[in-house]
Amino acid sequence: MTHIEFSQITKSFKDNHILKGIDLEISAGEFLVLVGPSGCGKSTLLRTLAGLEKMDGGDIKVNGKSIKNIEPQNRDVAMVFQNYALYPHMNVAENMGFAMKLQKRSASEIHTRVKEIAQLLQIDHLLERKPKELSGGQRQRVALGRALARQTSIILFDEPLSNLDAYLRSQMRIEIKRLHQAVKSTMIYVTHDQMEATTMGDRIAVLKDGQIEQIGTPTEIYHRPKNLFIASFIGSPEMNFMEGSLVQKLPWPEAQKPGQILGVRPEVFKISQGSLKTSELELGSFQVELSENLGGQQMLHGRIEGQSIRIFADSTEFFSKDQKISVKIDLTKSHLFDKKTGLNQRLLGA
Amino acid sequence: MIKKLLAWLGALLFAIFSIYPMLYVLGVSLRGDNAFQSQTLEIITSTSTVKNFISLFTQTDFLMWMRNSLLVATVTTFLGVAFASTSAYALSRFQFRGRNMMLFSLLATQMFPPTMLILPFYIILSKLHLIDSFFGLFLIYSSTALPFCVWQMKAYYDTIPKELEEAAVLDGCSRWLTFYKIILPVSAPALVITALFSFMASWSEYVIAAVVLQDPQMYTLPLGLRSFQASLATQWGLYAAGALIVSIPVLVLFISISRYLVSGLTIGSVKG
Amino acid sequence: MTFLRLWILWVLTLTTNIAHAEKMRIQIWHQMIYGHRQVLAEAIQNFEKENPDITIQATYRETEELRSSYQAAAMGGSGPELVYGPSDQIGPFATMGIIQPLDGIFDKEHFAKFDPLATPLYQDKHYMLGALVGNHLMLIYNKKLIATPPKTTDELIAIGKKFTVDLDGDGKIDRFGLVFNYTEPFFIAPFIPAFGDAIMKNNAQPNLDTEGVRGAFQFILDLRDKYKIIPKECDYETANALFKQGKAAMLINGDWSWGDYKEAKMDFGIARIPMVSQTGRWPSPLVGTTGYSLNVNVKDPARLAATLKVLNYLTSEKTQLLFTERVAVLPSLLSLRENPAVKNNPLLQVSSDIMTVGTPMPVVPEIRAVWDSLRIQYQKILAGSLTPDLAAKGAQVMAEAQIKNMNEIVQPDASLWIIKIIVLLGTIWLLWASRSGVMGFIKGFWGPQRFVYFMMLPAFVGIFAVIIYPFFYNIAISLSNFSLRTFQDWSLVGIHHYVEALTEPKFYSLFLKTLIWTISNVFFHVTIGVFLAVVINQVLPVKTFWRTLFIIPWAVPQYITALTWRGMFNQEYGPINLFLQRFLHLSPVQWLSQPFTAFVACIVTNVWLGFPFMMIVALGGLQSIPQSLYEAAYLDKANAWQRFRHITLPLLMPVMVPAILLGCIWTFNNLNIIWLVSNGGEPGDQTHILVSYVYKAAFNLYRYGYAAAVSMLIFLILIAWSLGSLRTQFKKEQKS
């Protein structure tokens, strides 16, 4: 069980500051996802932990001991790469057993371990094949297997699923989660896909421009976004943002100040029926422009007082174009952001 | 259809163009009368005989030259591959002072007329007491083939993803092990090309060998062949037979590695 | 691993096997023809039996190579103890100070034992002890055809006409009256004094603008064009082959060739070259000797004594007799002239008679300039671009200029001081500017990046030793007066040679020719290479078979390629002309005796050996073009050409450009093909490109300083060009 602590990590390439003093603590056995738009420094942070990237300042402690001066090959860290980085001249079994072979483990031990992991990943029939004879999904499993076979206390994932198609990706997500529960290593997973982040992480750290914007459980981040960036980055479809007259309808005193933005997730909108609860607010009349059928639900694209809004509705109902519906929102699930600072005003008081 | 026919025709024409000269040499080697000239286009005539080939092996030191050439060529190849693969790796993977300068100076070495290097070569080698020594040849051959080999190896290394090495490092490899266990095996096609170029450079080189080797016991094949070729009295039959046999190992080498040749010969983009 | 160990072991045993014994070893470099070498080997064996403490190592070198490698070796302070060659090499060698006079070693009585021809004097000193006398030209006739040889040129022409016949009536001459290597001035030299004066006067001055030269030139032209008794194109090998096959009644050749005809079991006779009817004078062949000279570096008394022992043995009666009996050469020792082996040999007797009208071979170094200018002018006449009159005038001017260049000892000028100052300041600046760099470099070996440094080290030590040092050495030579007369004590003189090269129009015309050479070669390499790559990739079945087939030219060593193609371009016997005649019914082309066609021949040869490389590069490039692009183009209804033009070509370019760049550099500097196919720039020095010109200047005309300066200019041109093209390429890539 390994506990990791990053403190004040800085890193820059020439004038480009990639990491601007990152503080992050990861508890033993946790599955932490680093998410953020490309160029935010998430991969770099991961690579400093692996030792593939030297940091300019700060320190990383693993179980309380600094690993700053430990060479990457001695850090007891495994990593799964985006392009898998399988050794093309070795077969699957050799790929998986390579690290153990370097550690001078006995052949039988390596064999047993490789077999075991291969069975766990259902690739035991591929052990004799070379990487180029495998499909993308199979390669991904082998890369995973190589990382697992080493029995390291930390496993890092650098966007491992981005080269797979949507179906395989969703399958592998579950697989990796399952493996985490089975092996109990501390795992750090980098992705730019917020969906992956929210479905997989015990906790999520959202990065932007070399800084951590928010850390928390997926639910926390989803429901209590610290700022405008996180609110818009996490969640699909994206949160609706409204300005001006719509904001002023709110009963909150902060809402009356200029430069405020109202943020409401699509599922928080409800079609008004009967009386309003105290936490609810009738926002206005929604003019339907387009309906998108998602199976159990449909998403309605339209406008309220000229501002573009998306809301969810039950797919059994029929809405025609230009039909006007009155909609309400749940105030406890709505957010108010300051346009200038981006901060979530509703969280400030709390 | 017509286009296909034309393509076939072109290919056949060039096929004749590329093999006829060697057939011609074959014809000369089979002639019994030690004449380069004969007014016939046939390769094999009624007077054809393998006499020249027999006397090449029985009456001349051909086998000894062959042994010397093989020795020189294998050592040169080994040194060339060892030097080119290591330094090209450094040039491909690490940023250090003067890297671009080094790359360009490698290219620049190809621009100096090689004939003017003979005299200085001799002076260096005689100072190092390497005249009449295979070590002198090893040194010169492996170094003169190096610039091209380094360029070519570097271009190939550039195509290998960095992650492969990172994976190896995290698996516990030192830098040397990463190079030796991962990069070298992956670069097999380029190594083969480098080996081929080093081999060729030493197998058929004549001018420098003539300066370095003075003891007939140490003659390599080109030197030996040239000794059939006196100023005004050439042993054409022996020469042609020898020429054919000299070309065969290179040809076999080429054929056996031709699949690597296509995938391994990356001179790369100029960007460097 | 075990394989590696075994291999190293094998290498070690092989290299140690060749370790030398403790005996005194005397080296001889010689240029004996094949038959003579075997006799020499026997003589050496006998000597070693009698003198077990000395071993002799005889090394064969072709004449020109013997010259250049001996020069390099002797200058480096070593080289063979004895060098054996024709008498005309003593002039240059003695001038360079790389052979020593024999006068202090042997007394007058010893020299007197030899035919005066065998002990030529250069600047009143003996530098050579001849082992045989002769090397002269004569008329050799096929006794089956001719009973009595012609006495005069009129008879020669008459007999020649009689035997020049078209036997099978196909309009092509099947037998010639006379053949000889008439493109080489040495072979027409006997006629020159017969028409007028000798080619040298006052010992070392050229005498070429004479009736003799004009007359001889015209005479050969007449033989070829008016009387038509000699072939249109004829080099040494062709003449020899024609004569041996009975396709020529008479031949002009030297005494060295007898062995060849004996071996071919020919019934032949020899005679004087017929008297010139116009003047009533006998053509006078040059008579010389071939013998041994002593290396200047032999100083150690013990070594000198051993060397002299060898020299005495090789010029002794016993050895000379062995040679006379085996290969019928005229011994140089007068005491052997009455020996039955000489007396009873009819060939030697006639040969001695021929020698009575001969002229001693000039040994002064200036003779090289005479030969060279005669060759250049004469080959221009044969190609029809000059008249004998103008040619004779031109030869004189050229020879004088060459001799001036050769003998010139350039004195330091003001530029030397400037250069010295620049170099000094430059060095100081470089040391100062690079002090941190150098320190950083040295520190690098202990720093975190030391792995990189150790990876780089072996390759760069090698490259430095083998390429960088010679490069700077060359810069020094290019600024020096290094030439024939300053061979042992050259000094820096300044930018003289650069100025000289850049003010000569010749440099620019050669540069232009080099450009044409490079561009046309690379153009064909790339076009053929890409064409074949595309055809192999898209049309032909069994790709590997075709690929292998087209690789053949690449696998053949260049020197073999060159000589093979030279043979293929032969006017009389080359398969190319035979093909033209038999299948296309065209008249044969004199490929190698016209400047334009000779240049074309060089290009064809070089195209042959160069296209496979480009083909392989292109094949590699084609593999990386996804098939889907072609399918898309198919749907867009693009035809084959459009597909090539818009898909293949642009995607192939990034792969081809570096190959083309390298190809240009290699072709620009490719000496082998030009030199070997055109036989050193023939006809008349008109097929040179810059590098072959440099080679000639350095190794044939001894102008090392000048050659080094021109090669530096070549280097600078290539550097500038490649920097330029790299930059434009870089810009293009930036844009896209």
Image (cartoon, coloured by chain):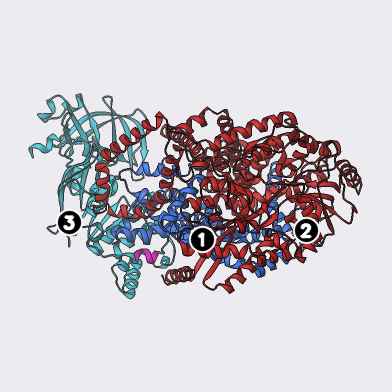
Position of the N terminus of chain C, as image quadrant, is bottom left
Looking at the picture, how far across and down is residue C702, in whole percent?
54, 42
Please name which of the two marks, 2 or 1, marks the residue nearer to the observer: 2
- Magenta stretch: give its range: A92-96
Residue for badge 1: B73
In the rendered structure, the residue with mark 3 lies on which chain?
A: A
In the rendered structure, the answer to whether residue C135 lies left or right of residue B223 reads: right
Q: What amino acid type should be assigned to the residue bearing mark 2?
A: Leu
Q: Residues within 10 Å of mark 2 (few under 14, many from 20)?
A: many
Instruction: Give me the residue at 91% from left, 49% from top.
Output: C168
User: Quadrant location of residue C586?
Assistant: top right
User: Quick check: can you spot residue C537?
Assistant: no
Q: Which residue is mark 3?
A: A67
From this view, report whether residue C324 is shown above or below residue A320.
Answer: below
- Residue under label 2, please give it: C348
Colour chain C appears in: red
- From the rendered image, report the letter of the chain displayed in blue: B
Q: CA distance from mark 3 to mark 1?
A: 49 Å
Identify the secondary structure beneath mark 2: helix
